[in-house]
Image (cartoon, rainbow, N blue to C red):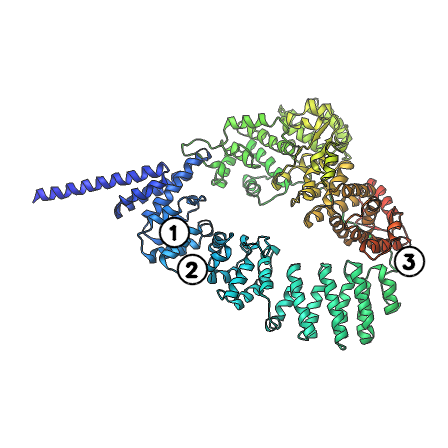
Amino acid sequence: MSRGIDETALKARLTAAREGRAVNKLLITVRAGRDEGVPGRLKELGPGDRKTALAELKALRTEVRGWGWARWNEQTRVQRALRVAGAGCHTGAAAAAAWIGGRDLNDWSRSTTDLVLGVLADREPAWLGDVAQRLAERPAVAEGDYRLVHELVLRSGCAVPTTDGYILGWTREVTGPRLLEQLRADRQTPILVPRIFDMIETPDRLTWAAGPEAPTHWPTALKALVDEGVLDRARLVDGCVARLLRGGKPRDLRFPLALLQLLGTDGEERRGRTAEWIGMAADAPSPVAAYAQEILAGLAAEGSLSVQDLAEMSGPVLFRTEKKLVRAQLSLLAKELRRRSGAAADLLPLVADAFGHEDTGIQERALKLVGRHLAEVDEQVREELACAAASLSPVHRQTAEELFGRATDFGDDLPYEEVLPSVPELRPVRDPAETVAELIEDLVAVSKGRTNAPEEFERALDGLVRHAHLHREKLTGAVAAAFADAFWMQKSPDGGLRDPFGHYTYGVDVVLAALMGMVRPSRIHDALVRGQGSGSCVHQALSRVVDARLWEIASRIGGDPLPFLLAAPTRHTGAIDPSVLVERLRVYRDAGIEPAPVDLGQALLRVRKADPSAGDAGAAAADLGTRAGERLAHWLTADATLAPGPRFLSRDRDRDRAEGKVWSAERLVLGFRERRAVREEFPPVFRWLGEAEAETTRHCYHWSGERRNWPSVLPDDRETLAALLVPTVAGGAEWDERGAASSLTALAECEGPVGPATHLAVAIGLGSRHAEDRLTAVDAWLVLTARGDLDAGCLGTTLAQLVAEGAVKVNRLADAARTAAATGAYATTWAVLAGTLPGLLAAEKPVRGLGELLAVAADCVERCGGTAEVGGLDAVAGRGGSSQFVVQARRLRKALHHPSLHADQDATQLVGKRHQALRSALNPSVTKRS
């Protein structure tokens, strides 16, 4: 009996040993990253072994997550093997789906898909279906590993998932030269296609700009399936209309619009969706609105559109900015007014809404339409129309007076008043946080990106230095608690320091990491050495100034922290009051502390030379008896700017002109005054500012967070800063970059002389592709004008040169000028355009879009009463024809020479006088009266 028990126990021990060896073999295979060998090892495991192996796999997964970039290739191989092994060891559907869909185990190469399907081959269909549905709920897996999820659906026979991720993966899988065949053969097509219209964003494959004849054109393929009876036409029409009505980005509406146009609509479908068409015409992007407008016009022609519906449609459409839509609506209203004799009282007030349109041609068309049917309305409606006529451009006021009578109030008895923005004041920067708790709040906000203001970054940095000097132990404890999960607080698996600052400082994070001893001394040393160069472009040189300060602080904060930063700004622009800097140097002298070189260099570049106290501060600095004091005294009496202005290289100009690309920021040379003090006394990271010139040799890109701190490097030298920013701003006009003009706001608020570089930066910004960048440039233009710092004539001629060189497109400039004028700065806008137009009118070939710019100029002159001789205008205005170019030239000539349109003073001359007066004014007024 005992012998039998011994044999049983022995067999159990032998079995356990064999199973233990099998588990170890699996783990060895996984650790080696041999994913193709995992299925074979799993076959050797029983249920108990798989449970044991799963615990080991989870521990290994946790370990692998902590491997650094140095082991990235090994980490990827092991994680692929882990994915296959874990899928085979899990017995629960939820746990298996969580493991397969884990973000760290996600196999972007899809090399493990067949392996995972293989280890799951023996599972029950219901179990596989559960896993498939759970994976479909994970967008990254459903889209990225669509084939895995789809195969599980087929094997299990479960319902087809309709999640967004699964649909995205499906559209990518079937899109190709055989799109129609793939869709026709796929049983999922009738289920998934209608779901596309419910998605927030249309799948990329459906938005490809392919023509109807292309094999990858989805609308054409779906139309064919509708004709074959595979898809339900009515359901697709409903989906298209609902998606278009919901609105969104033009790219997302391209597919439903194209499909709806191919499917077409019958009379009942058009009449039954009148409200939907009206909504699209009012708010949808132009192509959708035009389609809806066309359908509504067809309904009106059939007599199926009531006057109330036509009125509901017309109001929003006439307020749209697209001229084509407004003209089409006025044409529709003209037809209906002729056809419906009693509709004038309801429709003419809506026509009068077009009196305020920016295009004078549309105003004229609306005014003529009102005139034709004015006799059909009563006195009350006539008075309403007469009041609306006050919105007309001055060029149409005489016609309006003849139509409505002299009682029409156009406000001509009021003197013209030029409106400019208030001059921004230099806001003081708040004192650094007084307590460690307050400092931690500031540091967290800056580190996490909750505040993007450069002054808050500087304030937090100065507070960090101060508290590291006074309360080091308390500060390190608070930082350890607040930043426990920070990337720089994590150590490598072997317990050593990670090296996350090899390429970036990540702002204040590098100083915090150095405070906590989490930065290798060799990394700090290498960074200090690397910071001695200027980089590959002037923008990298600016960024290196910022980084050099951070690395210098990091090198001191661990053992010998400074009491405070000399370069901490006192004004929101980054500037420092001279008296404050003198007092800081006095404290350093009394404490026997030698200033940090980069910190002192940045402080000198930030000190306000134009401050009224600069003279006394210079004398006080000289009396300090220190070398730093002598440098400050000399700096306060030095030239106000380093930059005489940008120049353009002449090389390749003929070739560029032949290629149609005449102007390029890559051929820009930034000229600087040679400054011996900068080259010999400043740290190496600043010395490029003392050279004769710096050339931008290539297009470069820098992220917005990096660009944000550039203006605070040179807040007192606006012209030099502008010269450095010109290539970046040019990215918005030449390379269509978004946000390229964002630094112009800070440029306008900085101090220092204004010269060609500032005018060039603003001019290029006005030609940016994106409307928000043009708006930023307009704000900078008006603020500089309000400060009395901008020469309108110089800006005008600069714009003419840029248009001639191809750097600025006229339609973008016209939009920017119209925006500036709409703020009430008509005289300011005209003063600039008066300098721009002669050069454009004198061009050998007509400048495309110049008629639009002439229209803006004419509107400004009509409103502000400007007068000037515009070379070439008479020749254009004397031509025959009715193009906008010729019509607007005549309009401008009439406005310039028509006495009834002039104000009491010449607005152009007034702006010039104001410009001179405001340069010496301490408190410029918000508004200027002409």
Single out the residue that lies furthest toward the right.
899
From the viewer's perspective, tell me whether residue 368 is left or right of residue 230. Answer: right
Q: Quadrant of the N terminus?
A: top left
Please give the residue where the numbered disc 3 appears in the rendered image. 900
Q: Position of residue 42 (x, y in %)?
A: 30, 44
Decide: few, some or many residues near mark 2? Use Cα within 10 Å; few <14, some 14-19, many ≥20.
Answer: some
**Disc 2 marks which amino acid?**
Val
Residue 462 sits in quarter: top right
Q: Position of residue 853 (x, y in %)?
A: 79, 51
The residues bearing labels 1 and 2 have C-alpha atoms spaced at a distance of 17 Å
Q: Are marks 2 and 3 in contact (CB under 8 Å)?
A: no
* Callout 1 secondary element: helix
Q: In the rendered structure, which disc, 2 or 3, sits on the residue that comes first in sequence?
A: 2
Kindly identify the residue that appears in the image at 57 percent across and 63 percent down.
240
**Disc 1 marks which amino acid?**
Ala
Residue 733 sits in quarter: top right
Nearer the viewer's eye, disc 2 or disc 3?
A: 2
**Disc 3 marks which amino acid?**
Ser
From the viewer's perspective, tell me whether residue 422 is left or right of residue 838. Answer: left
Please give the residue where the numbered disc 2 appears in the rendered image. 160
Kindly identify the residue that appears in the image at 66 percent across and 69 percent down.
296
Q: Position of residue 233 (x, y in %)?
A: 53, 67
Q: In the rendered structure, which disc, 1 or 2, sits on the residue that comes first in sequence?
A: 1
Decide: few, some or many residues near mark 1? Use Cα within 10 Å; few <14, some 14-19, many ≥20.
Answer: many
Q: Are marks 1 and 2 in contact (CB under 8 Å)?
A: no
Q: Is residue 329 above or below residue 744?
A: below
* Callout 3 secondary element: helix
From the viewer's perspective, tell me whether residue 899 is left or right of residue 60. Answer: right
